[in-house]
Amino acid sequence: MASNPILENIYARRSVRSFEDRPVREEDINELIKAGFHAANGLNLQKLRFSVVTSRTKLNEYSATGKRTFLEYMAANDMTNPHLESNLRNDGFDIFYGAPAAIFIYAAPGIMTATEDASLAAGNIMLAAASMGLGTCWIGFAYHLGSDKVFLKDNKVPEGHKLLAAIILGYPKNKDQMATPRERPHILNWVR
């Protein structure tokens, strides 16, 4: 196949968990949110909303809350994973990996394809960030922040909005890190 910069970007993108200690420009964050908002969305309702956190103090606070609420969720649902539990109980573990910024994606009320829309927006943000030399990672441990009153108040999240994705963002420390090798896709069938 001929060289294609979009495919090259897709194949080279990776999750980054180690960042340089320098801020991401607000103009770049705004551009990434714009790219996320331009993702396909069900019925063109355009009901995704975004908040950005660049305060190291707040990210540390949200990390502690995210760890606590994720452990509570695991206990309430009889989920056990000693490795995860050990990390989440470790005061030194930062669920945001020291990233200088996090973008949170919410679904406003009335959205019919919330998970799909937020996932497509997150994918656009992550691919656009990679094309700009920035690293990202989707942070599942942050999911339950969407029910934390302090987090919702700090981020001015209106009633009825649902947190669906948290993407950390920054300049990767290891710029030569390779993407995780992938197997060939498993195509179950091809009806012709």
Image: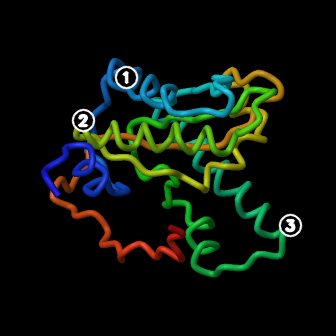
Task: Say above or below: 111 vs 147.
Answer: above
* Horizontal and vertical percent position of residue 122: 50, 41
Three-letter code for the amino acid on which mark 2 is drawn = Met
**Residue for point 50% across, 71% down:** 190
**Residue for point 41% across, 72% down:** 185
Label 2 SS: loop
* Horizontal and vertical percent position of residue 11: 28, 57
Q: As drawn, is 58 to the left or to the right of 171?
A: right
Q: Earlier in the sequence, mark 2 or mark 1?
A: 1
Query: In the image, which disc is placed on residue 132?
Result: 2
Identify residue for label 1.
31
Label 1 SS: helix
Identify residue for label 3.
76
Label 3 SS: helix
Circle 2/circle 1 CB separation < 8 Å = yes
Q: Bin the neighbour count of mark 1 within 10 Å (Cα to Cα): few under 14, some 14-19, many 20 and up.
A: some
Query: In the image, which disc is placed on residue 4?
Result: none
